[in-house]
Amino acid sequence: MHRFERQIHAGMLAAAYYEVDGERLVFVHVEVPEFEGQGIGAALIKGVFDNLRERGQKAVIRCSFMQNFLQTHPEFNDVVDGNS
C-alpha cells in the first residue's frame, strides 16, 4: 500500500493510504494520530487533491473520513472518479 504524508511534529505523520488501480488512486484510510479535530487531516486531504489535480489523476474514495470531507468541500469533486 502507498501513502501521502504530512508531518505533524517530532517525526509524527498524518497519512492518507491508497492502492493503485490503473491511473486511479483508491484511498482506503486516513490516519491522524493524537491530533483529531485540529484540521491536520483536512490539510492533508486538500494537499492530496491538489496534487492529484496537478497530475491529472483521479481518486476513488473508500475512506469515510475523505467522504465526509468531500461533503463540505465540493470544490474537489472534479478529482474524484465516481465509478468505483
Image: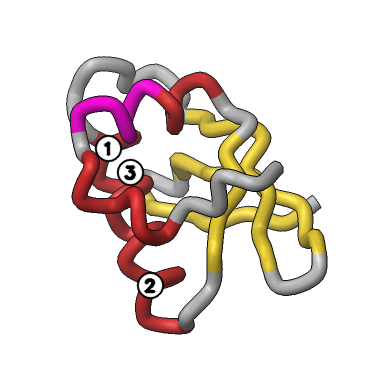
Residue identifier under label 1 = 42
In-front residue for pair 34/2: 2
Residue identifier under label 3 = 8
Q: Does the magenta portion include 70?
A: yes
Location of residue 79 in the rendering, given as x and y in whole percent from the top left corner: 42, 60
Residue identifier under label 2 = 53
Residue lying farthest to the front in this orientation? 83
> What crowding class fits label 1: few (fewer than 14 Cα within 10 Å), some (14-19), or many (20 or more)?
some
Stretch of the chain drawn in magenta: 68-72
Structural distance between the alpha carbons of marks 3 and 1: 13 Å
Q: Helix, strand or loop at disc 2?
A: helix
Closer to us: mark 3 or mark 2? 2
Query: What residue is at 32 percent from the left and 44 percent from the top?
Result: 9
In-front residue for pair 27/8: 27
- Direction from residue 28 to residue 10 in the image, left or right: left
Contact between labelled residues 1 and 3, with CB atoms less than 8 Å apart: no
Closer to us: mark 3 or mark 1? 1
* Amino acid at the residue labelled 2: Arg
Q: How many marks?
A: 3
Residue 12 lies, with reference to residue 35, above or below; the image says: below
Structural distance between the alpha carbons of marks 3 and 2: 24 Å
